[in-house]
Image (cartoon, coloured by chain):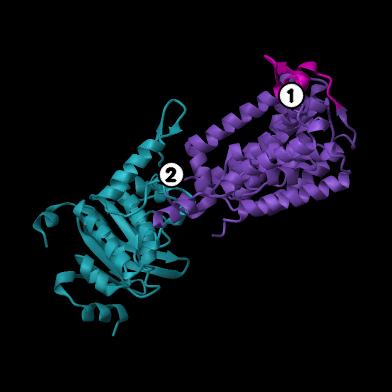
Amino acid sequence: MDLSNTQAADVLQLTNIHKAFGGVVAIEDFSLNLKAGEIVALVGDNGAGKSTLIKIISGVHAPTSGTIAIDGKETSFKDATEARASGIEVVYQDLALADEQAVYMNMFLGREKTKGPFGQLDRKGMVQETEDLVKELDVRIPSAKTTIRNLSGGQRQGVAIARATHWATKLVLLDEPTAALGVAETAKVEENVAALKERNLAVLIISHSLDQVFRLSDRICVLRRGQQIGVRETAKTDKNEIVSMITGV
Amino acid sequence: MQSTMQKLRQLNLSQYVVYIGFLLIFLFFAVTLGNDGFLTQRNLTNIVLQTAPITIMAIGLVFVLAAGEIDLSFGSIVAVAALGSAVVLGDYPLFVGVLAGLGIGLAIGFFNGVLVAYLRLPSFLVTLATMGLFAGVARSMTDLRSVPVLNESFVNMFGSGSLFGVPSLVLWTIGAVALGHFVFRETKFGAHVLATGDNARAAQVTGIKVPHVRLLVMMICGGLAGLAGLLYAGRLQAARYTLGESDLMTVIAAVIIGGTALKGGKGTIIGALVGSLMMGMLNNGLILMGLSVSDQMIVRGVIILIAVAISLRDVNN
């Protein structure tokens, strides 16, 4: 591991997170630290609690007990808007894109740029920033003015990740970013994820593909039925160990 | 080749149907009714004047449809607002009567909006119910009697008056279209309306206050229906429970033909204006052709069906 990273303050600190819905325990005593520029993969079978954990970190659900700290400061998010204001962005499984709107409007959804005394939309500015960003991230779309509906699955995923990249200042959470993509598109999205690391953002990624997890992550955290089974450094473990941690055999 | 195909796909036919349809219908009537007074300035002005309340309602409906909701109750709102305003004008000055009409519209819109936005009842069912409810209220308000509007400044302002030679109904139309277009197309709120109708979940997770947007579009539609009620009362110098009653189909058709998507996420105010004028022209031409009322209804229904079919043709592609 890179030394400069270990010295940096932890971007995200989850301590003894517990979450129950009514009587059903979804997450039991989960603790994890994430550093800037680090990619941690969250793996586990269906229903292990991965998505619940993402929702807790992004402010959608409040934990029943336990603490969340950002840059060492304890916080409790009232809703997703507060989490976003703290620099946490989520790339949802369904991407959360508005299909009939242009790429640039999706990039600035809910945070549109305005100008002038009457608060007019600054379309030119938004288009320009979007063009710059997709160029930098090498997301290949015809133009920032293209409607999302006219993009391929990989292009849409690229737009969703670009949006998170644009707004995140600390942490990006990705929920199954390549689940519906082909081989070439997956490779492209993985490049986009790696680019987040280069921007010194912390990344927490949910993935079912162990190949992908081993290609991308610095550490792997395994969940099974709401329990944290363990965290391994990717370089010091192998698929067999992770598989047995996931399945319990 | 690829990019040409993509450009063709993006060149959404529905955006232009209304302009082509408008021209075709205009040309058809100009040729067949040229000698029957269709082309006279008086007749053409009349079309615009008669269309004013339709256009105003259509603007409200664009906001509602673009946000992924629907309002079926605006016709009833027109009647209640017009009657309320006319009754108040009997005893109180102009501005109280105007406030009464607009206030009634906004209040019913608020009522619809709360049920739709915060109780998450389907807008189709909510406004189907309030359409009936307020049609009943309109009937019982004055026991089916019509109420004359004698306030001259009201009649000038919302009916027969003019400013610098421009009829007030034209001014209201231009003002409402300009303001509606600006808000819909150029402001954050307009963008949030489109996002809400397109993908409410995406709108919500990006911090847009979706219930707020839904409430506001229902209020805009109600408020504009109130204004349409004032325009009817001003032009006819009376209010009656039948006002707005038969406008539901006309307004929905005008908006859809204009290029606004029934399923949300897409809309245009200018398209709704042209769609409204097209419906007004159609009405006018069919009357000039001497068709009986029942034949007018049939022909209008068929033409709306064709126009709507063409505008929606590319939605599923």
Q: In the rendered image, which quarter is residue B3 located in?
A: bottom left
Q: Which mark is residue B158?
A: 1
- Residue found 66% across the figure and 54% down from its top: B309
Q: Is residue A82 left or right of residue B100?
A: left
Whether residue A63 can be seen here: no
| Residue B252 on image: x %, y % | 69, 46
Q: Which mark is residue A110?
A: 2
In whole angstroms, how far apart are the C-alphas of marks 1 and 2?
A: 38 Å
Q: Residues within 10 Å of mark 2 (few under 14, many from 20)?
A: many
Dot 1 amino acid type: Phe
Please identify which colour was used for chain B in the image.
purple
Under circle 2, the secondary element is: loop
Q: Position of residue A139 (x, y in %)?
A: 31, 54
Instruction: Specify the subunit that label 2 lies on.
Output: A
Q: Amino acid at mark 2?
A: Gly
Whether the magenta-drawn stretch holds residue B149 is answered as yes
| In this rendering, position of residue A8 left or right of residue A44 | left
Q: What is the span of residues highlighted in magenta in the rendered image?
A: B148-169
* Chain letter, colour cyan in render: A
Residue found at x 45% / y 30%: A119
Quadrant placement of the N terminus of chain A? bottom left
Is residue A101 depicted above or below A188 in this figure? above
Q: Nearer the viewer, residue B20 or B262?
A: B20
Q: Residue furthest left?
A: A3
Single out the mark in the foreground, 1 or 2. Answer: 1
Vertical side of B181 occupied by A91: above or below: below
Viewer-proximal residue among B183 and B111: B183
Any part of residue B255 in sight: yes
> Is residue A41 positioned above or below B48 on the image?
below
Farthest top residue?
A: B164
